[in-house]
Structures are given as C-alpha cells and as structure tokens.
Image (cartoon, grey):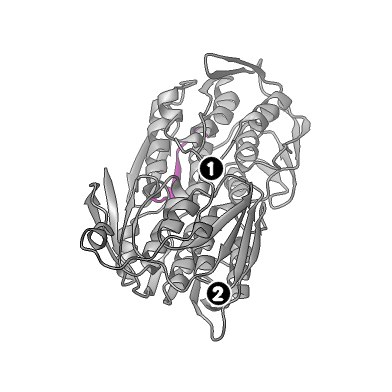
Amino acid sequence: MDMFQIEGAKPLNGSVRVSGSKNTSLPLLMAALLAESPSVLEDVPDLRDIREMVRLMSHLGATVVREGTRLIIDPAGFNVDYVPYDIMRKMRASFYAMGPMLARLGHARVSLPGGCAIGDRPVDLHLRGFKGLGAQLGRSSGYVHARSVGRLKGSRFSLMGSNGTSVGATCNVMMAATLAEGVTIIDDAAREPEITELGNMLNAMGARVEGMGTSTLRIEGVERLHGCNWKVSFDRIEAATWAIAGLATHGDVTLENVGFKDMASTLRALEQWGAELTWVNESTLRVRRGKGMKRALSVVTEPFPGFPTDAQPQLTVLLALTPGESSIRDTIYPERFMQVPELNRLGARIKSPEKGRIEIHGVPVLEGAAVMASDLRAGAALVVAALAAHGTSQVRRIYHIERGYERIEEKIMGLGGSIVRLPETDADPGLDSVLFGEETTPLASETMVPTRAVS
C-alpha cells in the first residue's frame, strides 16, 4: 500500500487539463450495453473505478478495449445476468448493470451494495423505478433478483426519496426505460449534468429521451439501440479541486477543458470568497486570489444546480484558512465530514455542533502531519490541505483518491507542487520534533470534533 509525501506551502502555478468525468463515464459505459453494435467513448479517464467497471463489463460478456483515452465497447457477447458481491463491494456503481440487464436480457441477479463511509446510500429508488416498469423483484442472500415478463412496460412514477432525488437511480431507470414498451414518465428525476449527458448519448444511440435538465423525464421506448461515438465531458469535481488547491496555496491556476454551466454554483461560491475568475475562452478558466480580505462563507450543499456535495470536503480546506467563522451544511450526505478530524490534525479548528453541519474557525496556517484518507473526496481534501500546509505531510490510503483523480501526482508536479509516492510506513513526519524536544503547538480542546467510527 502506498502513500503520498507532500512538501507544502508552495504556490501551485500554471495550467492543468481537467480529465473526462468519472461520474459521467460510469453510466455511459453501462449504456453501451443497451446497443446491438459497438460504441466508442472518448476522453474516458484511467481510474480505479473505470477499471473496475471495465472488469464488470467483461464479466457480463462484453468486450472492452482501451486505446489511450478511448474505450471501444462491443456488447455482442453481453449475456450474463449476474453481478457478484466480489465486484459490487469494490464499486457501488456496479449496480448500474441492473438497468441494461433487465432491458436487454429480461432478468438480473445483482448483489446489494454494502455500507458506505459517507453515509446511507440505499438502492430503494432504483428498485422502485424498475417495479414501475413492470419488473418482478425479490431479495435473498444479499442479492436482488429481477425479472421482466416480455418487454418492460412504460408507466409514470416518482423517484423522490426521503433524502431527495437520486442521480444513480435516475440513470439506471432511464437506461432500462429506453427499451421498454410505451412511454415512461419519471417525475422528481435528478437534474445533474451526468443525467443530461446520459440522455444525450442514449438519443445518439437511437433512444427518445426528453426533459434532461428538468425534474421530469419523458422516455418513449424503442425496440433496439445502436452504438455511437461519444466524447465524455469534463470532470466538474476535479475542476473544483484544482481551483480550490490553487487558491489555498496562494497560486495562479488555469483550468483547461472546463465549462461554466456545469460548475456555476462552485464558481459562485469561490467568487463570494474572494477569488478572481477569468475566462480565457469558453473552455479555459484562470483562477487566482483577488485583492482584499477573503470572506468567510456559509455554504449548503444541494442537488444540482446547487453547490455539489462532492466538492464540500475540498472547500472545507479553503475555509479553514480563511479568517472568521464559516459553516457548511451537507444536506445530501449529512455524515460526509470524514475529513474534519484529519484536518484538525493539521491545525485546523473545525467542530461539528450537530449532525450534518460543521463550523470552521479560520487559522493563519496549517502544519504538516500524517493523515489518512477515508473516502475519495475526503482524500482529495487532505491532498489540498497538505499542499497548503507548512512542512511535510503524509497522506495514507491513497487508493481512495486514485478512484477519482487521474495522474494526480503528475498534475501536481506540473503545477509546481512537491509530491512523491512512497510505500506506507509507520514513520510520522512530526515525530522528530517530539523526540528532540523542539517546541510544539499545544492542543486546544476547541479544535476537536466528535469522531465517528469508520470501517
């Protein structure tokens, strides 16, 4: 197992190309299984999650070949209706297989996902949608069993759950509905860019999907779909991460391969904080600190077009270095503050007065320490914090980070950051100062937050 060792307090300067979107690529790959001929996806990032999805598709009988950033998918051999736990436990997005299985094969056996570090993420809305399309459902021994007698049948139903809408359920049910008989109306559909892009790709394959970007989708079923060529859009969360990293390190970063619409709420928050944003052209954005005092913020995560929960941990780092009192409430995943105890190890002053909300008292600097990633976005936040901190930090369990950030070391070094990959050890970069009696900063009880058990 590897870790990152980062020498911080070096401004990130220069240009970085944002990769294709992980969260968009995953359902697009599954959508290719709906076709009767090959599809080609361009600008697919080479990530752990993508490799796991390709492994799943091969298990299902499809052939997937990577040529650089291009993936060529031939669904001709797609005939397996079974997703085992061994695959599901490595990536929850494996549940996306259920929609294409039902639509193409008429039956599916899919392992239920296990627990998730960032909170409860049930699949009940996926199953509600499949039931609405006429599928017969059952559960046994940790698996969902689904069957359709003949083609799925279009109908009208809502995908609103107790925690709001679901991007995953909307994608999954929309894929299944493209080959259903009749018209399907999905009320309370998610509106995220991933939904819009999936709908547009499905239409390029011969589907009839309307209403993307709204809360009501209309899908007129067709008898068959064909393959297509599709270029994956940029990763809006990676773009947010690089923008925040540049600001946190007092740098000047230019983001290439980005767009305004998909990250408008993030850019709005950064401008309110005091960032200076300059569009060089429609796909290139320069991000740097504006003149004057940086403002503390009160931010609430919301479904798109609101501020994204996936950028919340990274924003926490920037606010931890901002004078005054900031706060963040996460309405999507109220338990998604795994980065907080680790940031406090670096000298941040963050507390959690209630579930789903943190209060951040800005400090002048962070100081290097050994920290541990607990999930993808918390891990990204720790990398940003380490880049901004004075001294040496070690970020462990970086396999979480590699799920969603392509060539992260190369990109950091390209911006002038100092990062190396090392085997994990028990060494602590702060240990020598303790052993040799150097003065250390005393702990303050107010910097501590209640910790939650993480498996």
Q: Which three-letter amino acid code belongs to the residue tagged 1?
A: Ile
Q: What is the magenta range? A: 35-45
Residue 102 higher or lower than 373, as above or below: above
Please say whether residue 334 is one of the residues in the magenta stretch: no
Q: Are marks 2 and 1 in contact (CB under 8 Å)?
A: no
Asked if 176 appears above or below 411 in the picture, the reply is above
- Residue at left offset 38%, top offset 67%: 389
In this orientation, does residue 32 appear? Answer: yes
Q: At which x and y percent is residue 288? A: 48, 78
Name the spot of residue 21 as percent of width and height, x first. 48, 53
Pick the quarter of the image with the C terminus. Answer: top left
From the viewer's perspective, tell me whether residue 370 is left or right of residue 97. Answer: left
- Horizontally, residue 412 falls left or right of residue 265, namely left
- Mark earlier in primary sequence (2, 1): 1
Residue drawn at x 42%, y 28% as measured from the top left? 87
Q: Which mark is residue 25?
A: none
Q: CA distance from mark 2 to mark 1?
A: 28 Å
Provide the residue designation for mark 1.
118
Say which element carries label 1.
loop
- Does 56 sit above or below residue 207? above
Which SS type dominates the magenta stretch? loop
Label 2: element kind: loop
